[in-house]
């Protein structure tokens, strides 16, 4: 009998230990995950019952909570909703949160670990703790300029400071008003959300950092140029210069954007091919460098980095493994399966602008508790050094030529050396082109790096070019930075 009791006692003890251990894991190690789980209704109601902290731009709220007479106590509102929707995202009752609202929800709702004492004080006093204020790096004048310049086009604009990585503008269109999703009326919310979700323009997608991404077209030539220079080639390295080129093991032919040969000579240098945005020399260059060399360079710029947060998650740009020489040649001038975000291309330009050093992009300047104590202050941090300073200097000279007397002429600004690169990417045989510009200015002391993407050919199908539509948008953003 004692033997059986001992067995039962051991089993009960083991069960108790297992229960104790699992409860400790849940309470201690999984608490952050549980708080962030959208199915946690307790956290949801607590978030609405607390005075959520504001999101600020230049000290002024672009998202704020105000008292209301319902069970949730506070209503979230966005004074300039559409203008900043790509940044703030939305805060909803039961459909999750996006943008800064989602990625910094714990701070804004007052439930972050650093706010534990405030939570404890709230329990003692019976008062709900207030959320922290989040100050962004966005510059309101530059944001407005990007918004106005993009107009009614479908696309996105990103501008950042090369020396720090601070994002000073982020716009995505079509856009939406997050106020219609912050309502406490469930039926109204669902109607508005479904309408936005099924809108063919996909306004809920932040095209600056997410979505299906776009082929980069000739802006990817910057990555290939960097790989070439880092491999020991020079701007004067030349390639045969035919007007058309048949891809290996294929009957398909590629041409240069303007038709004819690249500059008219028997050969074309890398410098000439970049300045005039010629496809054929870059196809040959890409084949000579090979997939691995270009892929390694792309990774250094941030391609395939699934961990990048600004603090929102950034969809990784991709330079997929090519399966044939023909694919390798196409991918070397930004076609094939290459896909990038505007933020990624702004990072490439920012690297060149910053002497080869890439600063980690960042959207948040500080997080401040209600008592004005700083919970987090964001200092510039280095993401990596994708290229040498000499490569950066050489590419700067080449990119200045692109704007001064090359294919990116519509980005010129009187009295300012602008460095840039346009792109006009094909989307199949019949799809409208994707139009690009990326660059920085002033070239001798860069204050801004910018990337612009315009989808659907800017409404002109396959008759538009990056220099025609994307470059003037970037010019307006650069001018706003220089005149602020």
Image (spheres, helix red, strand yellow):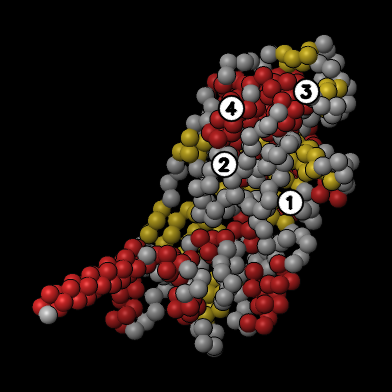
- Secondary structure, mark 4, is helix
Look at discs 3 and 4 and give the one toward the viewer: 3
The answer, for residue 199, to whether it is visible in the render is yes
Q: What is the crowding at mark 2: few (fewer than 14 residues within 10 Å), some, or many (at least 20)?
A: some
Q: What is the crowding at mark 3: few (fewer than 14 residues within 10 Å), some, or many (at least 20)?
A: few
- Secondary structure, mark 1, is strand
- Secondary structure, mark 3, is loop
Q: Is residue 57 shown above or below 123? A: above
**Residue indicated by mark 1:** 155
Q: Calculate the distance from the C-alpha at mark 3 to the C-alpha at mark 1.
A: 34 Å
Look at discs 3 and 1 and give the one toward the viewer: 3
Among all residues in the image, which is located at the extreme left? 2
Q: What is the crowding at mark 4: few (fewer than 14 residues within 10 Å), some, or many (at least 20)?
A: few
The residue under the point 68% across, 13% down is 237
- Secondary structure, mark 2, is loop
**Residue indicated by mark 3:** 248
Q: Calculate the distance from the C-alpha at mark 4 to the C-alpha at mark 2.
A: 14 Å
Image location of residue 394, percent across then percent down: 61, 21
Query: Upstream in the sequence, badge 3 or badge 2?
Result: 3
Rendered image: mark on residue 292: 4
Q: What is the crowding at mark 1: few (fewer than 14 residues within 10 Å), some, or many (at least 20)?
A: many
């Amino acid at each position: 009998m004692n033997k059986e009791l001992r067995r039962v006692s051991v089993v009960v003890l083991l069960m108790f230990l297992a229960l104790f251990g699992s409860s400790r894991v849940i309470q201690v190690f999984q608490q952050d995950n549980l708080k962030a789980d959208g199915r946690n209704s307790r956290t949801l109601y607590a978030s609405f019952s607390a005075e959520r902290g504001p999101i600020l731009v230049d000290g002024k709220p672009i998202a704020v909570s105000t008292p209301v007479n319902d069970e949730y106590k506070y209503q979230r509102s966005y004074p300039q909703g559409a203008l900043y929707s790509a940044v703030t995202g939305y805060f909803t009752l039961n459909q999750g949160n996006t943008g800064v609202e989602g990625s910094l929800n714990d701070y804004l709702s007052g439930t972050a670990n650093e706010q534990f004492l405030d939570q404890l004080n709230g329990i003692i006093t019976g008062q709900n703790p207030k959320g922290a204020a989040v100050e962004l790096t966005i510059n309101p004048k530059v944001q407005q300029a990007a918004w106005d310049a993009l107009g009614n086009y479908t696309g996105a604009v990103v501008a950042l400071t090369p020396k720090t990585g601070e994002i000073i503008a982020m716009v995505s269109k079509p856009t939406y008003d997050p106020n219609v999703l912050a309502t406490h009326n469930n039926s109204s919310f669902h109607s508005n959300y479904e309408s936005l979700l099924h809108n063919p323009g996909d306004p809920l997608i932040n095209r600056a950092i997410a979505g299906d991404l776009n082929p980069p077209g000739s802006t990817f030539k910057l990555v290939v140029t960097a790989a070439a220079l880092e491999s020991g080639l020079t701007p004067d390295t030349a390639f045969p210069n035919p007007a058309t080129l048949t891809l290996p093991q294929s009957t398909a032919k590629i041409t240069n954007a303007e038709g004819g040969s690249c500059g008219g000579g028997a050969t074309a240098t890398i410098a000439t091919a970049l300045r005039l945005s010629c496809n054929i020399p870059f196809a040959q260059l890409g084949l000579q460098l090979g997939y691995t060399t270009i892929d390694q360079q792309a990774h250094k710029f941030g391609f395939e980095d699934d961990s990048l947060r600004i603090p929102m998650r950034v969809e990784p740009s991709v330079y997929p493994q090519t399966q044939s020489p023909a694919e390798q040649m196409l991918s070397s001038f930004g076609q094939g399966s290459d896909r990038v975000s505007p933020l990624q291309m702004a990072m490439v330009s920012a690297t060149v602008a910053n002497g080869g050093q890439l600063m980690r992009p960042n959207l948040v300047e500080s997080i401040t508790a209600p008592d004005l104590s700083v919970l987090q202050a964001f200092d510039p941090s280095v993401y990596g050094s994708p290229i040498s300073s000499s490569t950066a200097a050489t590419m700067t000279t080449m990119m200045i030529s692109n704007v001064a007397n090359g294919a990116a002429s519509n980005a010129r600004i009187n009295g300012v050396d602008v460095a840039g690169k346009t792109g006009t990417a094909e989307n199949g045989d019949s799809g409208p082109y994707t139009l690009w510009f990326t660059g920085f200015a002033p070239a001798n002391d860069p204050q801004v790096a910018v990337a612009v993407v315009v989808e659907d050919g800017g409404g002109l199908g396959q008759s538009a070019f990056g220099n025609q539509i994307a470059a003037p948008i970037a010019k307006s953003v650069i001018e706003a930075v220089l005149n602020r």
